């Protein structure tokens, strides 16, 4: 089959550079904030128009309100719309390559020195909410595919771009829903690249897991001057928190040899992140709720973590006489793929001309890769994108434009290589 050299593909990326950066700026202007999930339809409509113009067969995948209600019962008034765009057709003989990324962003928040949804370029950096996390990843994969076409590389098998919602709150109605509905499955996806932020020099093999949950201690209300008539839920929670403190020390001894970055994150952990109790300074509170963030290293499971939390609650109940209630917010199982899988080795090889030897890492936080690996059963799945991890969720978020271009060149060459169309 006809192919292209790396230099052909690099030149094609440069030829499409201005269009791709214009695409990225327009995407960044759409305020797809999550929570609660605003303007998803606007984002999907923009992506539909752009990808249709590029010759993709585009489907907008709407999530039924009943499915949204299961995961986000307070957000059913906001539409969930995912995008699946494909060139070619899976046929079982030629490889099927799938790029996927999320177009929801965390709320802009305060303390910006510029308008978060008016993208600005200063000193080679593009500033906007979502610039690194992770609309630049979507732009890079689209640019890479544009370059393949410009360089005359025919699509062997299929090339799919999916853009999903709700990653910032668990991904269940985004990529998770696409996996449930078969849009990402072994019969239509051989290689998957999740374009989340890690910078263009790095191949991410997976991520730690997480369990977010609330625990509520029940007590009995009383006037503060007759506290003996009540049962203080704050003090009951204090007993539970002391057990969490001991549990945290135990978790810190559970470590992994996987290359989690930073190295300080190569251990299990738990943090109490929020606490709520009380009505007035003169009322003994009858309820106290704490929120927790439990991090799991590869080798742990969410079910085991649930059981450990339940045991701590039982012990606290016995010690205090209070009842403790558990409410789960979200979970993500740890996910890691082998370093020597084909897609990881291919990307490492194509990174080398730009950065030397690629760095292989595992993310300290969870992301949507788990749906592809754990649920769809596709092991040939890595995370690779141009965004910078330390720019995720911060004020004055930016992405270096050079990173977007370099990542697109790596993606174009790697895709041609996976399709057997890279001329040495």
Image (cartoon, rainbow, N blue to C red):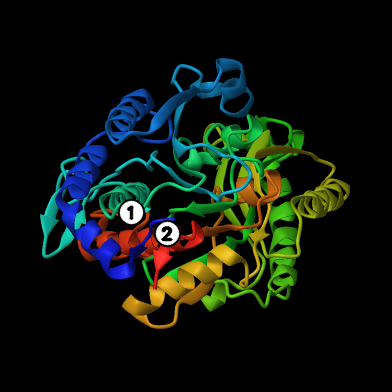
Q: Distance between the residues labelled 1 and 2?
A: 10 Å
Q: What element carries label 2?
A: helix
Q: Is residue 76 above or below residue 150?
A: above
- Mark 1 in CB contact with mark 2 (< 8 angstroms): no
Provide the residue designation for mark 1: 144
> What is the quadrant of the N terminus in the image?
bottom left
Residue 22: image location, x then y, percent: 17, 44
Residue 415: image location, x then y, percent: 44, 57
Residue 228: image location, x then y, percent: 75, 39
Query: Taking 280 as reference, is 225 left or right?
Result: right
On residue 294, the disc is: none
Depth check: give the residue in front, 51 or 60: 51
On residue 416, the disc is: 2
Q: Is mark 1 on a helix, strand or loop?
A: helix
The image quadrant of residue 27 is top left
Query: Taking 102 as reference, is 302 left or right?
Result: right
Q: Is residue 246 visible?
A: yes
* Residue depth check, mark 1 versus mark 2: number of the one nearer the observer: 2
Q: In this view, does 60 lie above or below 1?
A: above
The image quadrant of residue 8 is bottom left
As drawn, the residue found furthest toward the bottom would be 356
Query: Which residue lies at the image location 44% right of the left edge and 21% below the top edge?
Result: 79
Q: Determine crowd level at label 1: few under 14, some 14-19, many 20+ residues with C-alpha closer than 10 A.
A: many
Depth check: give the residue in front, 188 or 304: 188
Query: Which residue lies at the image location 25% right of the left edge and 41% below the top edge?
Result: 28
Depth check: give the residue in front, 238 or 133: 133
Query: Which residue lies at the image location 32% right of the left edge and 29% below the top edge?
Result: 52
Dot 1 or dot 2, earlier in sequence: 1
Query: Which residue lies at the image location 68% right of the left edge and 39% below the top edge?
Result: 328
């Amino acid at each position: 089959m006809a192919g292209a050299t790396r230099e052909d593909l690099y030149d094609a990326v440069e030829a499409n550079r201005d269009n791709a950066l214009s695409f990225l700026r327009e995407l960044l202007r759409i305020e797809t904030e999550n929570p609660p999930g605003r303007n998803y339809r606007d984002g999907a409509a923009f992506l539909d128009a752009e990808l249709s113009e590029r010759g993709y067969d585009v489907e907008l995948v709407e999530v039924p309100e009943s499915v949204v209600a299961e995961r986000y019962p307070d957000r059913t008034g906001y539409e969930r719309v995912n995008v699946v765009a494909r060139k070619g057709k899976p046929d079982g003989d030629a490889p099927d390559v799938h790029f996927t990324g999320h177009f929801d962003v965390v709320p802009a928040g305060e303390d910006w020195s510029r308008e978060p949804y008016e993208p600005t370029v200063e000193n080679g950096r593009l500033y906007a909410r979502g610039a690194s996390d992770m609309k630049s990843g979507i732009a890079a994969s689209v640019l890479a595919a544009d370059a393949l076409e410009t360089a005359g590389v025919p699509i062997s098998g299929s090339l799919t771009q999916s853009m999903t919602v709700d990653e910032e709150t668990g991904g269940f109605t985004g990529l998770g829903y696409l996996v449930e509905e078969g849009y990402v499955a072994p019969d239509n996806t051989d290689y998957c690249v999740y374009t989340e932020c890690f910078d263009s020099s790095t191949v991410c093999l997976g991520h730690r897991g997480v369990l977010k949950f609330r625990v509520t201690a029940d007590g009995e209300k009383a006037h503060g001057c007759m506290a003996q008539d009540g049962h203080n839920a704050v003090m009951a929670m204090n007993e539970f928190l002391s057990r969490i403190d001991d549990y945290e020390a135990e978790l810190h001894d559970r470590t992994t040899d996987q290359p989690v970055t930073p190295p300080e994150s190569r251990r299990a952990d738990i943090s109490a992140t929020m606490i709520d109790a009380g009505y007035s300074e003169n009322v003994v509170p009858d309820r106290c709720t704490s929120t927790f963030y439990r991090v799991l290293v590869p080798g742990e499971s969410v079910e085991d973590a649930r059981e450990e939390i339940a045991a701590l609650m039982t012990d606290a109940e016995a010690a205090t006489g209070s009842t403790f209630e558990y409410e789960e917010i979200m979970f993500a199982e740890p996910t890691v793929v082998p370093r020597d899988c084909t897609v990881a080795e291919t990307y490492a090889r194509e990174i080398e001309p730009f950065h030397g030897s690629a760095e292989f890492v595992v993310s300290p936080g969870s992301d949507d890769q788990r749906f592809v690996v754990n649920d769809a059963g596709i092991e040939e799945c890595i995370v690779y994108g141009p965004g910078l991890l330390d720019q995720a969720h911060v004020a004055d978020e930016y992405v270096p434009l050079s990173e977007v271009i370099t990542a697109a060149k790596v993606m174009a060459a790697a895709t041609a290589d996976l399709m057997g169309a890279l001329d040495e």
